[in-house]
Amino acid sequence: MAGPTMISKVKAYWAPLILFGLGLFYQLVVLPRSFPTSHYDALGIKPYSSVEQVKEAYEKFSSKWNSGEEIPSTADFLKIQYAYELLTDPLWKRNYDIYGIDEQLHILEKVREQYGEESYSRIDLPLLDATDRSVHAFNVVTSEDFPSIFHDSKPWLIQVYSDGSYLCGQFSGAWKTIAALLEGIANTGMVELGDIRLATHLAERKPIGQIFFRRGLPSLVAFPPGCKSSDCMTRFEGELSVDAVTDWFATAILKLPRIFYYTKESMGKNFLAKTGPHKVKVIFFSKTGERASPFVRQISRNYWAYASFAFVLWREEESSIWWNTFEVESAPAIVFLKDPGVKPVVYYGSFNNSRLSEVMEQNKLQELPQLRSVTSMELGCDARGYSRAGSDTTIWYCVILAGRLSPELNKMRETIRRVQETLLSDDESNAADTDQSLSPAAVAFRNKRLTFAWLDGEAQDRYCSFYLFSETSFETCGARRDMSDVPRLFIVRYKRNTTEDEAKIERKPRNIWDAMQEQEVDPASQLVVRYNGSDEIPQIAKWVSEIIQDGDSKDLPFYRAKTPELVPEDSEPLLTRSAQSLFSKSIGMKQRIRNIMGQCYDYLGDPRIGPALLLAALMSFGTIWLMRGQQLAHPSQSGQPGPSANEDENRPARRKRAKKGSNEAGPPSITDEEPKDAYQMPLLDSDSD
């Protein structure tokens, strides 16, 4: 009887027993490991004792050793000597007392392994080297300056350092490089641990409220764009290297896309072939193979609508390939690939943020730019906008070559580029040598009143058909129906009514039709002339000049219409992938797991967990004891004595037998099988009626 009774009690009290065991294990095993002995314990003094008290305690040990009264073991001597040297240095003591930083503990382990069980007198002293630990600090931020540094929306990267830290001194060179790479796109600053108020604000906190730096010093924290408090602050947890820090900051903080490296085998099929024809191809040649710097990635995002970017690692054995392909002689270099058949534009040397921005602005468009949703206003080929010459210009022109992507279109694009060169050279030459018939077009082109562009007739079907509405427009606009592709040239004359633009009188529409008309028509009038001549360059240039001369001199009808919207091009996956989805190598899977384990370890060091587990065990035990006592006092409504332990165990068996017996004794239901002697009673005539 005792065995089943004990088993029944264990089953009833299993939860409080487990909680009680966990509480004891936490108090006796886990908690002591979370709070190891301090260096003050090695000297036998109270925590946070002064430097004088540390020296007094060490002198007591030293006098005993010198007198021969006590001979310490090597391990004990190393503990005492290390604690003395650490706690007598003001900076090291400050870092240890306030933040728990002890970055030289590896030296103690190294000396232990070196001397083993040898006599303590053979150990070379001092253990710690207090010389050459200076940190070259710049852009230091103090607690007084901190509230006012967020005057703009630029992000911040701040290094928390200590003047007495070897690791911070070793990181100084890398930090200068990081600050230089982030110049122009982010602010950088340094905070010394001596500024306790600000350093505490930037430090981490354990569940018990203790401040610390999980990965020691230096510690890097970032404030994303627009962030002005610690609530949105992000902490760097990766390897302290230039590449890892800048990649993390560019990817996680600035949300910038990466620029990938390509080889001579993958350049054609994975970059050039997959990049849209409307974009300029920008290729960086690097000697080092370093990742794209943050300002390069920033510029690539700013110009993603105009260009695609790639990196190539320069190797001398492949130099002939790159010379024959892109005319690149050496690295570092940047190559701009524009229109088909146009010579690549090559720049040599290193680039900073301002120079690269200037070069990109000069080369962001093709020699014959494409008319697109993002370029129509900039090119002056939009009836809702203005001329490239400025908003004061009332009449301007746009020559558009429309067609589907094909060899015929590429050939015609080359012709139009030659027309541009003809007008440009005609304008720059002497008046005696120029063809006066081209003068109107040359002057308009120089004054930015004339623009040349090409249009993808297949992608911009509605826009193309709006200007080339005819029986043969299918040969130029829309999807390809047959093998014939006929590029067509036309010119659009835009004119704005300056009187109407300046007045801008707000008048109420008389009816719904007037309101719809006011909203739908474009502010500038458009007159379209299609070119039906030959593909000769002089003839095209002369035709453009004649149109401009007539458009400027004659009073033509002011006709306004609603131009179809240009369809945005498909986004390029390489540069439009969200930066959050790019897995940063600076914070890999191992590092993420390590961070999670560190957070769990912080909670294990909470001394409140053990008493909470013991209290939960006590409350659970009392609750179960009371419930069992009530069951024994009131076993059932009929006043029968409560069930014994044997009855508790046999109750499921009795229920099973009772259920089985009830099923056998019960009458058959309509769902049971039909009895063998059953038959259908015939119906009487009266019943059938």
Image: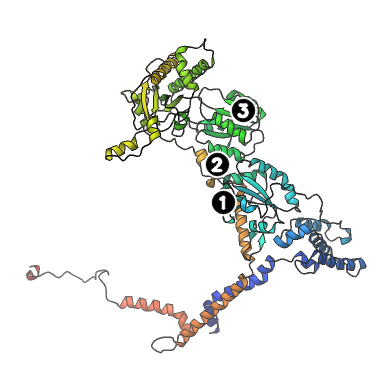
Element class at badge 3: strand
From the top left corner, tell me how far across and down residue 182 is, in percent: 63, 42
Eye-nearest disc, 2 or 3: 3
* Mark 3, other Cα within 10 Å: few <14 / some 14–19 / many ≥20: some
627, above or below 455, in the image: below
The answer, for residue 479, to whether it is visible in the render is no
Query: What amino acid does circle 3 point to?
Result: Tyr
Eye-nearest disc, 1 or 2: 1
Query: What amino acid does circle 1 point to?
Result: Cys
Element class at badge 2: loop
- Foreground residue among 629 and 411: 411
For the view shown, which residue lies furthest in the top direction? Answer: 432
CA–CA distance in space, label 1 to label 2? 21 Å
- Foreground residue among 55 and 320: 55
From the top left corner, tell me how far across and down residue 73 is, in percent: 84, 65
Q: What residue does disc 2 label?
A: 257
Q: Which label was assigned to residue 111?
A: none
CA–CA distance in space, label 3 to label 1? 37 Å
* Mark 2, other Cα within 10 Å: few <14 / some 14–19 / many ≥20: many
Q: Quadrant of residue 506?
A: top left
Q: What residue does disc 1 label?
A: 227
From the top left corner, tell me how far across and down residue 271 is, in percent: 53, 33
Q: Which badge, 2 or 3, is on the more N-terminal residue?
A: 2
CA–CA distance in space, label 2 to label 3? 23 Å
